[in-house]
Image (cartoon, helix red, strand yellow):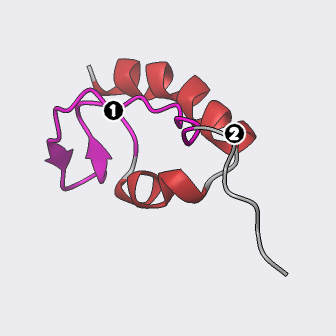
Amino acid sequence: MSVPPPSGPPRSIATPCVKVCIVDGASSLCLGCWRTLSEIGGWSGLTDAERARIMAELPERERARR
């Protein structure tokens, strides 16, 4: 049984990455996007709902660090 080819280009994954990767050693937070290293590493494997939940938390993480 063969798998049909994709019908179009791959769907892009929403990401808060701003290409400023500076990780705070104490908190393991990227000071560019405010995600943890484990969140960054597993980002592509998360569901849309999981990514949306994390993205909703990012503004508060940033406020807490400023």
In the picture, which quadrant includes the N terminus? bottom right
Point 76% across, 69% down: residue:
3
What amino acid type is highlighted by mark number 2?
Asp
Mark 1 residue element: loop
In reply to whether residue 64 is colored magenta, the answer given is no
* Direction bottom: furthest residue: 1
Residue 43, x across and y down, in percent: 50, 51
**What is the magenta range?**
9-35
Distance between the alpha carbons at the discs numbered 2 and 1: 15 Å
Point 55% across, 29% down: residue:
55
Callout 2 environment at 10 Å: few (<14), some (14 to 19), or many (20+)? few
Q: Relative to 42, does residue 18 appear above or below in the rendering?
A: above
Question: What secondary structure do most residues of the magenta stretch adopt?
Answer: loop
The number of callouts visible is 2
What amino acid type is highlighted by mark number 1?
Cys
Residue 48: image tag: 2
Q: Relative to 40, does residue 17 appear above or below in the rendering?
A: above
Q: Looking at the image, which is closer to me, 57 or 3?
A: 3
Mark 2 residue element: helix
Point 23% across, 34% down: residue:
31
In this rendering, position of residue 46 left or right of residue 33: right
Q: Relative to 66, does residue 1 appear above or below in the rendering?
A: below
Residue 12, x across and y down, in percent: 52, 35
* Direction right: furthest residue: 1
Residue 17, x across and y down, in percent: 33, 32
Q: Looking at the image, which is closer to me, 10 or 38?
A: 10
Callout 1 environment at 10 Å: few (<14), some (14 to 19), or many (20+)? few
In the picture, which quadrant includes the C terminus? top left
Which residue is disc 1 drawn over?
Answer: 17
Point 59% across, 37% down: residue:
11
Q: Looking at the image, which is closer to me, 66 or 59?
A: 59
